Amino acid sequence: MEQFKYIRKSANRKILCINKFNGKVQRVSKRSKKLKRRLNSWSFRKLQNFIEYKARWEGVKVIYVNPKGTSQTCPICGYVVKPNGQLFECPKCGWVMDRHLNAAINLLKTQDDTLRFSMDRPLNVQM
C-alpha cells in the first residue's frame, strides 16, 4: 500500500472530477428510439449545476474531464491495453487492477501533477 500514499494525499485535496456531458446520448442501440428520446430529454446541465453548488458549499473544487481511454491506459508505464473484461492487466510492467479503479487513478493523475509512484512487483487488488 506504500504506492498509494500519494493517492491518499491527493484525494484529501477535495477535488471532484466529473465526466463532460454534452447533453446528448450517443451510444444507444438503434432499436431503442424511445429510450434514447427519454434520456436526451433529461437535464444534464441541471445536475451539473446542482453538483457544482453543493461542492462550492463544501469547499470542493469541481473539474470536468474527458474519461476517454482512462480504463485502457496503464498508470505506471502509460502502455495502452485493449479492454478484456473487468480486470486491467499490463503486459509491459505487470500492473494488475480492476478496470474502474485503474480509470480513477488515471483521472486523478491528469489533475494532480505531483502524483508519481512506481512499483517493483505487480500489485494485485482483490475486489
Image: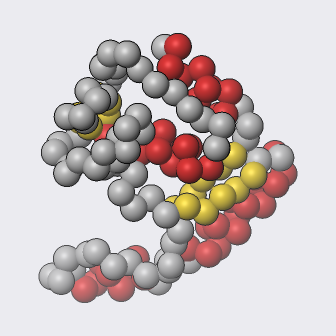
**Which residue corresponds to the image point at 56% horizontal and 77% vertical from the top-left?**
43
Where 7 falls versus 21 (above or below)? above
Q: Is residue 126 left or right of residue 57?
A: left
Q: Position of residue 79 (x, y in %)?
A: 31, 45
Q: Is residue 48 left or right of residue 83?
A: right
**Which residue corresponds to the image point at 73% horizontal and 41% vertical from the top-left?**
14
Q: How is the image coloured?
A: secondary structure
Q: Quadrant of the C terminus?
A: top left
Q: Is residue 41 left or right of residue 37?
A: right
Number of marks: 0
Question: Can residue 126 be seen here?
Answer: no
**Which residue corresponds to the image point at 50% horizontal and 80% vertical from the top-left?**
23
Given residues 78 and 107, the one toward you in this image is 78
Where 85 falls versus 27 (above or below)? above
Q: Position of residue 45 (x, y in %)?
A: 62, 75
For residue 101, which quarter of the picture?
top left
Q: Position of residue 99 (x, y in %)?
A: 31, 40
**Which residue corresponds to the image point at 75% horizontal and 52% vertical from the top-left?**
61
Question: Can residue 17 be seen here?
Answer: yes
Given residues 5 and 64, the one toward you in this image is 5
For residue 78, which quarter of the picture?
top left
For residue 37, which quarter of the picture?
bottom left
Given residues 48 and 80, the one toward you in this image is 80
